[in-house]
Amino acid sequence: MHMKKSLAIFTFIIVLVLASCTVPRTPPTPVPTETPEPTETPVPQPTPTAPPSAALVNGLYVTLEDLDIKIRQLRDGYSQTGADIPGDSELREEALEDLIDETLFLSAAIKAGIAPGSGDLDRETEKLCESLGSCDVLREWQSRNYYSEESFRRALERETAAAAMRPLIFEKLRETEQLHVYRIWSARRSDLDDVINRLNMGISFTELAKNYDAVTGGDMNWFPRGVLFSQDLEDKIFVLNPGEHTEILEIDKVFNIFYVAEKQTGRAMDTQVEQIAQRKALSDWLAEQKSRAEIEML
């Protein structure tokens, strides 16, 4: 009796388990998934091919084509003047130095925001055509000087940039200190010993100078630093105040005394003096640019 009761209970449990397995379940509500936004596949950009080059100056190429043209032009220049033509290595070094200088001007103009654009170069080319009479004459000139259309445009870009930079470089010359200097000189030191004695007696330097140079009166005119041939001599003169003179200075076996009559800043320079001062300013500017530039020989 007890066995039958246990069996009946067990059977009832089995039926409940089977029934629960057969009851259909409600499927879970699906969670919507976000559709990813479409993305654009980047199109690879072609890397510019560097031209065959001799140097890289502040990121600007000095092409081998331009170097070859400059070498040919230098060789022609030496030949036309009758000077001895340097060897190939010397010519190449001189040509490369010139191109590096020109490229430094272009680099500085780009940095200053005054570099010529494509339209500027077109206008400059038109001006050249007009000045020569026609563009055919310009093309003949380009051919004689070994230029292709592309190399001529690069050369024009460098020259136009240099022309734009020069006024900025020369601007400092307006505030340059200038001296008005007189000079007494003689091949005999005894003459200048006598001049010193007379100056100590209070006689005017400019009056004494007339005795030694009746044409100019010893007047060296006005000039700034950078005009005299000797840096040491300039240092001795530019420390003087108006009314003061140097000691007796021997220069190339000639004895000299220099006298400062006046000193001014911002005075307009004479044409010849200004040209010398401008060349010195350009030379100093290029030296400074080279010291700071990133120049790589390729």
Image (cartoon, grey):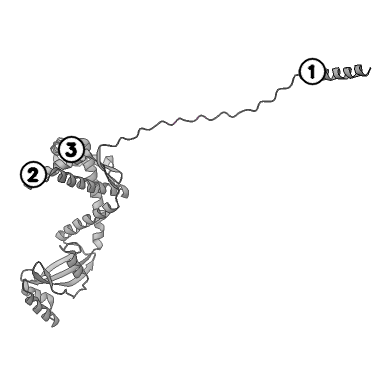
Q: Secondary structure at mark 3?
A: loop
Is residue 131 something one can see in this rendering? no
Q: Tell me: 44 left or right of 132.
A: right
- Look at the numbered discs 3 and 2 and tell me whether their residues touch, using CB distance below 8 Å: no
Q: Is residue 24 left or right of residue 196?
A: right
State the SS at label 1: helix
Spatial separation of the CA atoms under disc 2 and disc 1: 115 Å
Q: SS for tag 2? A: helix
Q: Earlier in the sequence, mark 2 or mark 1?
A: 1
Indicate which disc, 3 or 2, sits on the residue closer to the N terminus. Answer: 2
Instruction: Choose between 195 and 109: the one closer to the eye.
Output: 195
The majority secondary structure of the magenta stretch comes to loop
Residue 221 x/y as whole percent: 14, 67
At label 3, the amino acid type is Tyr
Q: Which residue is under mark 2?
A: 79
User: Height in image: 172 above or below 19?
Assistant: below
**Residue bearing mark 3:** 147
In the image, farthest residue toward the right = 1
What residue occupies the far bottom of the structure in this picture?
Answer: 201
Examine the image and state in which quarter residue 96 appears: top left
Work out whether 160 lies above or below 16.
below
Measure the C-alpha gap from mark 3 to mark 2.
Answer: 19 Å
Inspect the image, locate mark 2, and give the three-letter code of the amino acid beneath it: Ser
Which residue appears at 61% of the width and 28% of the height?
33
Front-most of 206 and 227? Answer: 227
Cβ–Cβ below 8 Å for labels 2 and 1?
A: no
Residue shown at the point (19%, 35%) measured from the top left:
148
Quarter the C terminus occupies: top left
> What is the crowding at mark 1: few (fewer than 14 residues within 10 Å), some, or many (at least 20)?
few
Image quadrant in which the N terminus is located: top right
